[in-house]
């Protein structure tokens, strides 16, 4: 059990962190998320949970834990109903207002529908300690498939999920926090800007983040895939990279058509010549990253000479990682 003494000890050695969570009608999941954070081997110095216009009993659940744990703060915001990527990021940024007076080393986001093992944040902090240039880190996302949690197909070391991540404070200040973007993708944007500023980013395979929200129906999935295509275009993804990424994702639900719809969303925005919310420098840097990954993937698949079965397996695995960091 983590004590107040151990929390002070962690802060003394530069291991203090703060968390922000945006929650909109999350009564079905938020208690499990809170229990997961409360059980961490190193507790956050402060955790601001923003109730973003919730109309269920999300607020009551949060407040019941806040009354027992002094590091938890409830911030209530009122807005129009409905889920929105922009409002979620705005809620997270609002939560930052309750952190200004604190001295901390890392700031993190935790979605309101995930759980983590008790050593999750301690392990991520250890990764930061081992790599002074590491700016953003998180675990791999696990979702329920066939009655058990399995690693999400799109998990990659190069792609840091937003669901339960930590950001070194200096890196967070360098990237200017999380940006409000029309189609989402604030985690991807933050990661690229961090790289532009010389910070490393990575997802840690042996750290698990359990995502509990059930995936929507096929129609919702198709709408989401179309949005993702428009998101890819809006951030300046290279067209050749986009095609290869969609080709590699034909195995994701909804099979085949999901990848085609995503590519269609990208093409739709391209044909409309939609204005991008990113700078030309950002787009150039991103495309250079993507072309480098394409080249690296091709090189891994075209090594001359006979390969062992183990080498062939590693090359096949490598080809799946040529896809984009989302």
Image (spheres, rainbow, N blue to C red):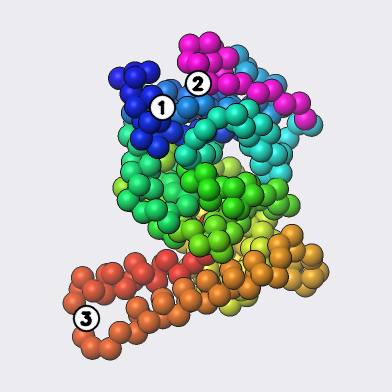
Outermost residue toward the bottom in this view = 304
Residue 240 place in picture, x, y as percent: 58, 77
Badges 1 and 2: C-beta atoms under 8 Å apart?
Answer: yes
User: Which is closer to the viewer, label 1 or label 3?
Assistant: 1
- Mark seen at residue 307: 3
User: Which is closer to the viewer, label 2 or label 3?
Assistant: 2
Residue 245 vs residue 290, the one in the foreground: 290
Magenta span contains residue 65? yes
Secondary structure of residue under mark 3: loop
Residue 253 place in picture, x, y as percent: 51, 54
Q: Find disc 1 in the rendering and name its residue.
A: 43
At horizontal 58% and vertical 42% (from top left) the residue drawn is 216
Quadrant in the picture for residue 284: bottom right
Distance (Cα) linking label 1 and label 3: 48 Å
Question: Does 24 sit left or right of 16 as displayed?
Answer: right
At horizontal 33% and vertical 34% (from top left) the residue drawn is 119
Secondary structure of residue under mark 2: loop
Task: Say few, some or many: other residues with alpha carbon within 10 Å of mark 3 (under 14 / 14 to 19 / 20 or more).
Answer: few
Q: Earlier in the sequence, mark 1 or mark 3?
A: 1
What residue range appears in magenta? 62-79
User: In the figure, 281 relative to 92: above or below?
Assistant: below
Residue 191 place in picture, x, y as percent: 54, 56
Task: Say few, some or many: other residues with alpha carbon within 10 Å of mark 2 (under 14 / 14 to 19 / 20 or more).
Answer: some
Distance (Cα) linking label 2 and label 3: 54 Å
Secondary structure of residue under mark 1: loop
Q: Find disc 2 in the rendering and name its residue.
A: 71
């Amino acid at each position: 059990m983590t004590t107040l003494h151990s929390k002070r000890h962690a802060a003394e050695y530069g291991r203090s962190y703060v968390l922000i969570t945006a929650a909109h009608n999350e009564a079905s999941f938020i208690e499990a998320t809170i229990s997961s954070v409360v059980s961490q081997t190193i507790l956050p110095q402060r955790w601001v949970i923003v109730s973003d216009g919730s109309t269920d009993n999300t607020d009551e659940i949060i407040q019941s834990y806040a009354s027992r744990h002094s590091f938890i703060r409830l911030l209530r915001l009122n807005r129009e109903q409905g889920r929105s990527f922009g409002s979620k990021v705005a809620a997270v940024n609002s939560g930052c207002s309750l952190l200004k007076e604190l001295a901390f080393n890392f700031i993190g986001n935790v979605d309101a529908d995930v759980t983590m093992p008790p050593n999750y944040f301690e392990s991520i902090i250890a990764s930061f300690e081992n790599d002074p240039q590491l700016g953003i880190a998180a675990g791999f996302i696990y979702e329920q498939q066939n009655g058990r949690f399995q690693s999400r197909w799109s998990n990659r070391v190069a792609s840091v999920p937003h669901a339960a991540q930590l950001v070194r404070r200096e890196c967070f200040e360098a990237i200017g926090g999380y940006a409000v973007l029309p189609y989402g993708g604030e985690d991807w944007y933050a990661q690229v800007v961090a790289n532009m500023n010389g910070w490393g980013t990575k997802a840690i395979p042996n750290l698990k983040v359990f995502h509990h929200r059930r995936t929507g129906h096929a129609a919702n999935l198709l709408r989401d895939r179309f949005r993702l295509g428009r998101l890819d275009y809006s951030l300046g993804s290279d067209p050749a990279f986009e095609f290869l990424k969609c080709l590699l994702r034909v195995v994701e639900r909804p099979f085949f058509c999901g990848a085609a719809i995503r590519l269609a969303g990208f093409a739709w925005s391209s044909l409309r010549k939609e204005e991008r919310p990113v700078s030309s420098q950002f787009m150039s840097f991103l495309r250079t990253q993507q072309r480098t990954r394409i080249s690296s993937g091709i090189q891994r698949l075209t090594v001359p000479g006979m390969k062992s079965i183990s080498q062939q397996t590693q090359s096949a695995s490598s080809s799946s990682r040529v896809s984009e960091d989302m």
